[in-house]
Amino acid sequence: MDYDIIIIGAGPAGISASLYTVRANKKTLVLYEDLSSLEKTHKIENYYGFENGIDGKDLYETGIRQAKNLGVDVKKEEVIKIEMENNTNYRFVVTTSSHSYKSKVVILATGNKKNKPKITGIEKFEGKGVSYCAICDGFFYRNKDVAVIGSGDYAISETNDLINVVKDVTILTNGEKAPDFRADNVKIETRGIKEIIGNDKVEEVELEDGTKIKTDGIFVAQGIAGSSDFAKKLGAITNKDKIVVNEKMETNIEGLYACGDCTGGLLQVCKAVYEGAIAGLESIRKC
Ligand SMILES: Cc1cc2nc3c(=O)[nH]c(=O)nc-3n(C[C@H](O)[C@H](O)[C@H](O)COP(=O)(O)OP(=O)(O)OC[C@H]3O[C@@H](n4cnc5c(N)ncnc54)[C@H](O)[C@@H]3O)c2cc1C
């Protein structure tokens, strides 16, 4: 289905953006997965207008209901991929675990990055064999063996981007259940990961039981993809996993906006709501 504006994230930033776009008569879709930072918050006492504070989960769910009441399509679907099209009307194709949608504008509002696993060596080898983007870096591993860390739909999507380029892929679920996925050059390993080993670059992954798996590269796709993953794949500028935006919440990619925790700075509801409003208002002009 086609939309004017697709917003990824139903936290304060994404919902705030949608309130402005839908009231400007723009056909708006908000996609979200379960986790918002708000759901981890016991009580918010520093947000305007709640004299006794408000439970984070209640605020999250109220925001979603408010958007729906105003006519926003809000769907609980994990986004696994965003691609650009050479189509003058619809620039973006947004793929979820179950559907594909087109839009003129995308607003990224997925909060703080959460999918970096705590594995010894992962940060040390970033850019030296550890990558967060199969479509960007897969080419460097032509006919080589690589591993993908993860077990969900996002990990499968990354694996699919690699299997026609590299020799073999080992999906390392790091203790999670094996995904229901088969391909000739894909192996699945469910044992836990202890460490990533190498000298100047990644050479092996050591599992918790001491088994060592040789690999030329590792693609991290644990959990769900966040804004910075999507932004990097689309060519947007990021700085330490925060998306770089101007005062209009525009990234350097035409039609791509970002707001809330994913742009860094003050990680608070008030800032997410403000940036969402700006992204919503500014994006209206692009469609
Ligand atoms: C423990 C804790 C306590 C806090 N206390 C306070 C407080 O007292 N006061 C305050 O102002 N702030 C507080 N915060 C911060 C506040 O919760 C955040 O600043 C705010 O929620 C950020 O809003 P956001 O919309 O940018 O992101 P989030 O609220 O994190 O929303 C992210 C949205 O993106 C969706 N999403 C992510 N990835 C995908 C994907 N691949 N596909 C589809 N959807 C996706 C999620 O489902 C969610 O809907 C606290 C945070 C924490 C963790």
Image (cartoon, rainbow, N blue to C red):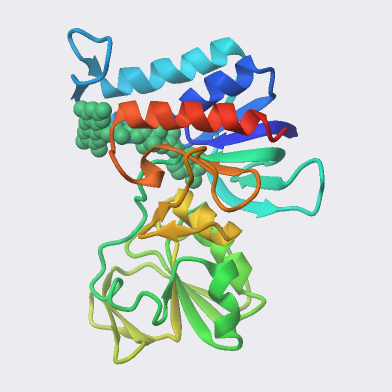
Give whichever of 281, 2 is nearer the camera.
281
Give the left or right position of residue 238, taking residue 90 as reference: left
Q: Residue at coordinates 28% horizontally, 77% vertically from top-left?
A: 124
Q: Residue at coordinates 28% horizontally, 39% vertically from top-left?
A: 266
Q: Furthest-front residue in view?
A: 247
Q: On the rendered image, what quadrant is the C terminus found in?
A: top right
Q: Position of residue 98 (x, y in %)?
A: 63, 42
Give whichever of 173, 198 is nearer the camera.
198
Q: Position of residue 101 (x, y in %)?
A: 70, 40
Give whichever of 199, 190 is nearer the camera.
199
Q: Position of residue 109 (x, y in %)?
A: 47, 38
Q: How many marks?
A: 0
Give whichever of 64, 222 is nearer the camera.
64
Give the left or right position of residue 115, taking residue 278 as reference: left
Instruction: For residue 258, say whether it is visible.
Output: yes
Q: Position of residue 34 (x, y in %)?
A: 41, 35
Q: Residue at coordinates 69% horizontally, 35% vertically from top-left?
A: 286
Q: Quadrant of residue 126?
A: bottom left
Task: Work out whether 236 lies above or below 246.
Answer: below
Task: Work out whether 234 lies above or below 72.
Answer: below
Instruction: For residue 36, say whether it is visible.
Output: no
Q: Quadrant of ligand 1?
A: top left
Q: On the rendered image, what quadrant is the N terminus found in?
A: top right
Give the left or right position of residue 217, taking residue 162 as reference: left
